[in-house]
Image (tube, helix red, strand yellow):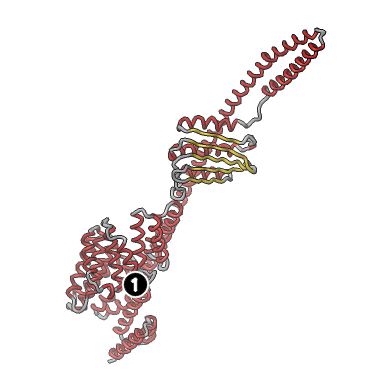
Amino acid sequence: MKFILYSVVVFFYINSAFAQQDSQYIIDSIQSNFLNSKIKDSSLVANAHYKIGELYRYSFSGGDSAYYHYYKAEKIFKSLNNDYKRALALYGIAVIQKDEKDFTGSELTSIEALSLLDGLRETNNSRRYKSFLFNNLGLVFDQLEQYDESILYHVKALDIKKSLKGDNKARIDNSKNNLALAYKNKGEYELASRYYNQILENKNLIHERTDFYALVLDNYAHTLYLSKNYEKLPHLYFKALKITDSVNPGGYNSIIINQHLAEYYDDRNNKDSAKYYAYKAKDISQKYYNDDLLKSLLLLSEIEDGDVAAKYSKEYIRLNDSLQKNERAIRNKFARIRFETNQIEQENIKMARERMWLLIISVVIVISSFLLYLVITQRNRNKELKFIQKQQETNEEIYNLMLSQNESIEEARTLEKRRISEELHDGVLGRLFGTRLSLDSLNMSNSAEAIKTRGQYIDELKTIEQDIRKVSHELNTNFVSGSGFIDIIKTFLETQTVAYELDYKLEHDDTIHWDEVSNKTKIHIYRIIQESLHNIYKHASATQVNISIKLKNNVICLKMSDNGSGFDVNRVKSGIGLKNMNSRINEINGSINIISEKDAGTTVTIEAPIT
C-alpha cells in the first residue's frame, strides 16, 4: 500500500513538472521528496534514480550526473533481482558511455543488458529495448570503424522494430538512417542510397519530422558526393540547409550540412565558396565546442593556405587534446562513481592499489616526458646551431669570393692605370716636350708676328704638358676603395644572365659609399639578387630583368623587375627561396615588397639602411 502511495506521488510530481515543461523542477521534486527523505522502499528509490538519470540524459546533457543516477538505480535493481529495470538502467549507461567515447565500456554494458533481456519472458517492451541496444551497438562499432559488425547490429535492430506492435515508423526510419550511414562509411554507396531513398519516399516526412528529413536529405547528398555522382549537387545540400534553417536558423543540424558544402566546393576547386561554408560551420559549432568544431577546424586547415592553414591546424590539435582530456576526465569520473557506489572493503583496497599504480605511471610519464622534452629541445638546438654554422660558412665563402673578385678588379685597374700613366709620360709627354723645344728654337726669328705666334703655341703646349702631368698623377693614384662592390655585382650579372639567357639593365647610384656599408649588408644584398635571378629563371620565363640600386635618405633601395609570367602573391605559398629572402632582409633590419600580376611580370623592392 505504501509503495502504491509513493508511486502515485512520484507520478503526480512528474506530470506536474512536465506540464510546466521544467525538467529541473522534476529533478528537484523527486530528490527533495524521495531521495532526500527517509523512504525505505528500495524499488521506489531505484525508480526515482532511474527517472532522474533519464531526465539528465535528455534535458541537460549532464552525462556524469545521468551516469551516477543510472548506476545507483542499476545497483538497487540488481539487489531486488529486477532484471528488466536493471537492463533499462544499463541501456542508459551504455548510451552515455558511447556519447563520451568509452566505446569498449558501452559495448560491454550493452551486451550485459541484452543478456538480462534474453533471460526474461519476451514482451513487446523487452523486444523494443533489445532493438535500442542493438542500435547502440551498431553506432558503437560504426565509431570504431568496424562497419560489418555495425551493419549486422543495425539490421537486427531494424528487424525487431518492424515486428513491434504499434506505430514504429519513426523508429524504423531512424534505424534505416543509421544502417545507411554504416553502408556509406563502409563505401557501399549504392546500398546507402537505397535506404535513404526508402526514407525519403514518405512525402509527409518533411512535415512530420522536419529536422530528421533535412538530416536524411543531407546524408543522401553526401553519399552521392562520395560516389562522385554530382548531378543533384549542390541542390540537395541547399535544400537540406534551407529546411534546417527554417526550423532552427543557425542551429546544430546545419553544422554538418555546411561542412559537406565546404567539402564539395573544395573538391570542385571553388575556394571562395568552400571557405564561406567552412567558416559558417565553424562559427555555429563554436557554440557547442565538440567534435563538430574539431572537424570544422580540420576542414579549414585543409582549405586555407599558408599561415592561416597552420593556425587552424594548431587550433585543431589544441581542441582535440582538450576534448580528449575532457573525455578522459569524464570516464575517470564514471570510474569514481562506480567506486563510490560499492562499499566493499576489497574494492577500496583495489582502488587504492590502482591509485598507487596511477601515481607511479604518472610519475614515470612525467619523468619520461621531461627527458623526452630535454632530448627534443637539445636536438632542435643542435639543428639550429648547425644551420647557423652552415649559414656562417656560406657567408664567409661569399665574402671571400667578393674579396677575391675585388682584389682581381683592383689589380687589373692598377695595372691599367700604370700602363696609361707610362704611356702618357714616356710617349705623349716626351713628344710634346720635343715639340716645345723645336718651337723654342724657332723663336730666334726676329719677326714680331712669328714670335707672337710661336709664343702662343709654346704656352699652349705648356698647358697641355701640365694637364697631362696632372692626369698621369691622378691615374697613378688609387681610386676610392669600395667601388668594387658594383663591379662584383656587374660580373655576377654578366655571368648569370648569360647562363639564364636573360638581358639585363643595371642602374646604380654612384653616391653610395660602399666602404661605409657593412660586409653583412653587402653579402645579404648579393644573395638576394642571386636568389631573385634564380627565381626569375626557374619560374618567370622572363627575357629581360631591370635592376636599380639607389640611395634615398640613407637607405639603399634595390629594385628588380622582370617581364615574366608573374604570379598571384596572395595565393602562392612562400617557398624556401622567399623565406630565405625574408630572413636575410630581417637580419639587416630592412623590408621587402613583392608586386606581381599574372602575365605582367614581377617587381621585388628591397630597402636596407646603410647603418
In this view, the residue farthest toward the bottom is 1
Name the quarter where the C terminus is drawn. top right
Give coordinates of residue 259: x percent, y percent: 36, 61
Residue 147 shown left or right of residue 591 in the figure: left
Q: 570 or 580: nearer the eye?
A: 570
Q: Residue at x 42, y 56 (%)?
A: 313
Residue 180 shown left or right of residue 245 in the figure: left
Give coordinates of residue 495: x percent, y percent: 50, 29
Residue 96 shown left or right of residue 405 in the figure: left
Name the quarter where the N terminus is drawn. bottom left
Give coordinates of residue 219: x percent, y percent: 28, 64
Residue 320 appears in the picture as rendered: no
Give coordinates of residue 517: x percent, y percent: 62, 38
- The total of numbered circles placed on residues is 1
Relative vertical location of residue 595 with respect to residue 61 in this rendering, above or below? above
Q: Which residue is mark 1?
A: 338
Q: 515 or 606: nearer the eye?
A: 606
Q: Residue at x 61, y 38 (%)?
A: 518
Relative vertical location of residue 359 with respect to residue 36 in this rendering, above or below? above
Residue type, label 1: Arg
Relative vertical location of residue 462 with respect to residue 108 in this rendering, above or below? above
When asked about the image quadrant of residue 71, the answer is bottom left
Relative vertical location of residue 610 with respect to residue 443 in this rendering, above or below? below
Q: 413 or 505: nearer the eye?
A: 505
Q: 416 or 339: nearer the eye?
A: 416
* Mark 1 residue element: helix
Label 1 crowd (10 A; few <14 / some 14-19 / many >=20): some
Residue 242 appears in the picture as rendered: yes
